[in-house]
Image (cartoon, grey):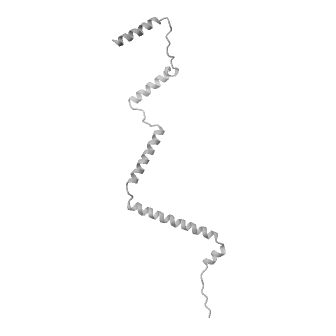
């Protein structure tokens, strides 16, 4: 009953204000163009028939890639390393220590004068005095 009454009031107000020009919304020239309507119709058609590729935005792809990487890292952190991985890690550490020692030794040799290096490389000869 109330709904009927409110529509009656609106009709009465429209009849009373019939001498005024009613404002209308201006048409959007882009939306009203036939090219836009055709394009929109084609996109809707392709979407309904699932002909459009399901390409995600680049930002969403990057976010999902990071989440996958974090998930992999968490899984690797949970499982203990195998014996092979432990041995390889130990071997890698030994090689790094050896390379650092070699580097230090070569740097120390560069700081020594040349005649001292040559003297150290000479053979030791025994001299016998009778």
Q: Quadrant of residue 11?
A: top left
Q: Is residue 120 above or below residue 82?
A: below
Q: Quadrant of residue 86?
A: bottom left
Q: Quadrant of residue 2?
A: top left
Which of these two is toward me, 115 or 47?
115
The N terminus - image quarter: top left
Q: Is residue 76 above or below residue 107?
A: above
Which of these two is toward me, 51 or 118?
118
> Residue 93, percent across and down?
48, 63
In the image, is 53 to the left or to the right of 106? Answer: left
Q: Is residue 18 above or below residue 101?
A: above
> Residue 25, percent across and down?
50, 16
> Residue 57, percent across and down?
47, 37
Residue found 51% across the figure and 64% down from its top: 96
User: Which residue reaches farthest left?
Assistant: 1
The mark total stands at 0
> Residue 33, percent across and down?
50, 20
Which of these two is toward me, 67 or 34?
67
Which of these two is toward me, 77 or 58?
77
User: Which residue reaches farthest bottom?
Assistant: 130
Residue found 44% across the figure and 6% down from its top: 15
Residue found 44% across the figure and 8% down from its top: 13
Residue found 51% across the figure and 67% down from its top: 98
């Amino acid at each position: 009953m109330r709904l009927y009454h409110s529509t009656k009031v609106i009709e009465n107000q429209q009849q009373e204000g019939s001498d005024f020009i009613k404002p209308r919304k201006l048409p959007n020239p882009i939306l009203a163009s036939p090219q836009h309507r055709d394009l929109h119709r084609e996109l809707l058609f392709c979407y309904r028939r699932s002909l459009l590729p399901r390409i995600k935005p680049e930002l969403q792809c990057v976010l999902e890639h990071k989440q996958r990487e974090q998930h992999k890292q968490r899984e690797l952190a949970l499982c203990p390393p195998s014996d092979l991985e432990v041995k390889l890690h130990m071997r890698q550490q030994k090689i790094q220590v050896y390379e650092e020692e070699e580097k230090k030794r070569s740097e120390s040799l560069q700081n020594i004068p040349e005649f001292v290096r040559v003297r150290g490389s000479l053979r030791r000869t025994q001299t016998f005095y009778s």
